[in-house]
Image (tube, rainbow, N blue to C red):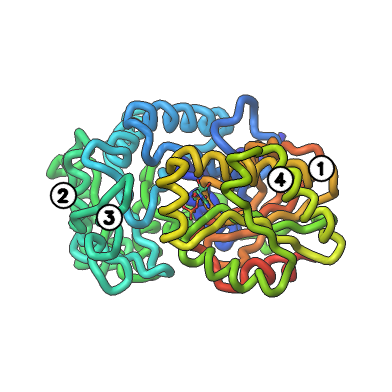
Amino acid sequence: MPRAPLLGCIADDFTGATDLASQLVSAGMRVVQTIGVPDGPLDAECDAVVVSLKSRTVPAAEAVGQSLAALEWLRRQGCGRFFFKYCSTFDSTPTGNIGPVADALMDALGADFTLAVPSLPANRRTVYNGYLFAGDVLLNESGMQDHPLTPMRDAFLPRVLAPQTRRRVGLVSHHALADGAAGVRARIAELKREGVGIAVCDTLGHDDLVRIARGSADLTLLTGGSGLGLTIPATLPGFEPRSDAAHLDPVGGHALVVAGSCSRATLAQIEHAGTRMPAMAVDIEALFHDADDHVDALVAFAAGHLGDGPVLIHASMAPERLRAVQSRFGTAASGEAVERALAAVARRLVDDRGVRRILVAGGETSGAVVGALGVSGLRIGPAIDPGVPWTQSVGTAAPLALALKSGNFGGADIMTRAFELLP
Ligand code: ADP
């Protein structure tokens, strides 16, 4: 009987889940990420499981339902400690979903207290006196104030969280952290006496994440960004870091890059890759004229070059061109058409042309591609760049090496360097 995972995580989006999983691997855990809540039991041995949901921007009741289903499944796999992962920019609205999901998970677990620790110091997301900073600026001056779905117009997190939760909200400030884990424990005891149920935690750097994890080791549930993924593992009873945590069996076969992200980092990566590998762009007009025909053309192009190394198929466009496409064909319709086409290209190249190693750029695009490939889970391997690990598919006919990156993640050379890292 394999040992039950020590830690069960619930992530509110797909690439965020991968980011967390990658941090847990760095801390020596063997990690499997599932795509949605699996129907059956986990059939892979690991130290931590991350269930990736799409619950960040759905109505709060739906996010709660998905998260409780994930919790129930994780408990059935034997997990005893839990982590609810959301974005390090605390992406949410006054009606949710961070507060309602935290409330529901606490109720289900009978937990009377938890922490909110969004910080990710490695990406310069820090919290000071309850105010969240992205780099040098407050969250509400970082560009996040204009986010289309979750505009963040207030950087003071206790005030952001309060309308989202039934519980009283408090703060574990840097004063408490200065006294180490004992300071955190003392502050938690004090907040509990005051009737606080959930407290935002200051974090200036990695050392604070160590203190927070140690000082909260007896809480059944923690919530936060991926940063805490580096420091929770060492606090789990019976956990020994594994030197082979990131080991994946080698996967041979052709290599493909699929990009559907229009984020700045991805555009730079495409520019870099475009001079180093055969590349073909999706023609939106052709796609709307005859999608099957255009997918055939993309597949034929890729198939003709696969023998020479990675091939790039992308739809990414700079903002002005993208806006023109969106106003002509509709934002949702063009986005979905592109996702469907890229997913179909990946699927056909895997099924018929021996592609086995794929890097996908874009969170939604990654979701569409893994859906089309029938991937039910990912074993997490070594990081290519922070938050972007190589993974191996679970549930596909042949094992696939997959790197799924959020649009803004990764260095300029990731599309070529990723494949050089594979054996
Ligand atoms: P990111 O991680 O950068 O947010 P996503 O893949 O999540 O990337 O989102 C990008 C969205 O933009 C996808 O829905 C994708 O289909 C869409 N998209 C990409 N290129 C185009 C394009 N040329 N025209 C219209 N929509 C596009």
Q: With 311 as the anchor, is 288 left or right in this view?
A: left
Distance from label 3 to label 4 (Cα)?
Answer: 33 Å
Q: Which residue is mark 4?
A: 345
For the residues carrying marks 3 and 4, which lies nearer the camera in this image? 4
**Residue at 75% across, 55% down:** 357
Distance from label 3 to label 1 (Cα)?
Answer: 42 Å
Distance from label 4 to label 2 (Cα)?
Answer: 46 Å
Helix, strand or loop at disc 3? Answer: helix
Give the label on residue 398, or none.
Answer: 1
User: What is the x, y in percent for residue 71?
Assistant: 46, 32
Crowdedness near tag 2: few (<14), some (14–19) or many (≥20) residues, C-alpha within 10 Å: some
Helix, strand or loop at disc 2? Answer: helix
**Marks 3 & 2, CB-CB < 8 Å contact:** no
For the residues carrying marks 3 and 1, which lies nearer the camera in this image? 3
- Given residues 95 and 328, the one toward you in this image is 328
Q: Which residue is mark 3?
A: 146
For the residues carrying marks 2 and 1, which lies nearer the camera in this image? 1
**Marks 4 & 2, CB-CB < 8 Å contact:** no
Q: Where does the N terminus fall, quadrant-wise? A: top right
Q: With 131 as the anchor, is 209 left or right in this view?
A: right
Q: Is residue 29 visible?
A: no
What amino acid does circle 3 point to? Answer: Asp
Q: Earlier in the sequence, mark 4 or mark 2?
A: 2
What amino acid does circle 4 point to? Answer: Val
What amino acid does circle 2 point to? Answer: Arg
User: What is the x, y in percent for residue 235?
Assistant: 46, 55
